Image (spheres, rainbow, N blue to C red):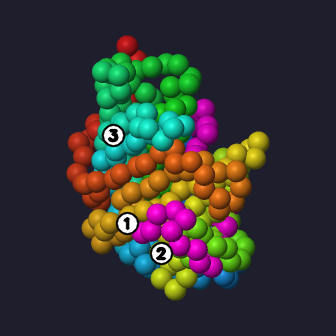
């Protein structure tokens, strides 16, 4: 994949107003089973998403996956472009029949674990459960958020989605289709977020996305590399950029590298259990 500003070509713009990207919730209960929520999209959006999901390995194959595990190297950059921080994390997800998550990493010599047991989320510091609301919210948001971005584009046909084809745009480094997506209320989504996804015409390959949040917040993510795991293509490298409007990346602010991506790992019965607060 070329670097930004290396190429300029026309792109299909498919804006998907996806509100479930970051689960900004502080409640204890997970979103209700969203199976009853409808999927709403126009014909063009459906064609684009079907093509993208077929390119990534197919929706039927995706629905058969029970768990997902991967390692993530997260690099953040300061305003001068220098590396500000590098964090190595391991993620374990139970995708079906019920969402569960476990994230482990070390930060400032402190062992941190994020747990979501299907009903509630908690953050542990050196094995001790935090009861602070900001840590509970952070565990909730982080566990859902990382699973969401790793499961693109399959998540874009999930219950409660609303997709709308917007038109063609020009990316600075490729030519994708863009779709606007959002989730219905009750799908565990953030109603302040609108996501725009860019796909390569012809192949359906996921290339990038833009996020528009409240107070006119924008950012831009480029999917630099995709790799196959158990037959499905997953994001192996993403780069995040500041932005001030749709499809206009600015300063590089983050890079996420994913390795050892694997589905259907076996976990111990208590793998996602939250210990009693100490």
Measuring 56% from the left and 48% from the top, which residue is drawn there? 251
Disc 3: which residue: 89
Mark 1 or 2 closer to N-term? 2
Going from N to C along the chain, the mark reached first, 2 or 3, is 3
Q: Residue furthest top?
A: 278
Q: Earlier in the sequence, mark 1 or mark 3?
A: 3
Q: Is residue 91 above or below residue 78?
A: below
Q: Main secondary structure of the magenta part?
A: loop
Categorize mark 1 by other alpha carbons within 10 Å: few (<14), some (14-19), many (20+): some
Using the numbered discs, state the Cα–Cα distance from disc 1 to disc 3 in whole angstroms. Answer: 19 Å
196 lies above or below 185 = below
- For disc 1, the marked residue is 226
Q: What is the x, y in percent for residue 220? A: 59, 55
Q: Nearer the viewer, residue 211 or 246?
A: 246
| Dot 1 and dot 2 residues touching (CB under 8 Å) | yes
Query: Label 1, label 2: how many angstroms apart (C-alpha)?
Result: 9 Å
Picture coordinates of residue 33 (x, y %)? Answer: 55, 53
């Amino acid at each position: 994949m070329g670097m930004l500003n290396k190429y300029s070509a026309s792109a299909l713009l498919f804006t998907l107003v996806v509100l479930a990207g970051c689960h900004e919730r502080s409640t204890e209960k997970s979103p209700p089973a969203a199976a009853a929520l409808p999927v709403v999209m126009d014909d063009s959006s459906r064609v684009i998403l079907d093509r993208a999901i077929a390119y990534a390995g197919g929706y039927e194959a995706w629905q058969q996956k029970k768990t997902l595990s991967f390692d993530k190297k997260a690099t953040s950059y300061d305003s001068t472009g220098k590396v500000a921080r590098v964090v190595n994390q391991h993620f374990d997800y139970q995708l079906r029949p019920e969402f569960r998550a476990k994230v482990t990493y070390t930060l400032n010599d402190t062992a941190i674990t994020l747990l979501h047991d299907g009903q509630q989320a908690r953050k542990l510091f050196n094995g001790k459960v935090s009861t602070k609301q900001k840590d509970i919210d952070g565990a909730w948001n982080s566990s859902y958020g990382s699973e969401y971005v790793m499961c693109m584009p399959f998540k874009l046909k999930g219950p409660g989605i609303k997709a709308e084809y917007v038109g063609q745009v020009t990316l600075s480094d490729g030519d994708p289709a863009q779709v606007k997506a959002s989730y219905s209320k009750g799908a565990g989504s953030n109603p302040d977020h609108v996501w725009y996804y860019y796909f390569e015409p012809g192949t359906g390959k996921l290339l990038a996305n833009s996020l528009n949040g409240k107070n006119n917040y924008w950012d831009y993510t480029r999917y630099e590399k995709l790799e196959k795991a158990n037959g499905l293509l997953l994001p192996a490298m993403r780069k995040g950029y500041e932005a001030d409007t749709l499809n206009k990346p600015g300063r590089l602010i983050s890079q996420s590298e994913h390795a050892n991506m694997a589905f259907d790992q076996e976990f111990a019965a208590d793998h996602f259990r939250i210990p009693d607060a100490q």
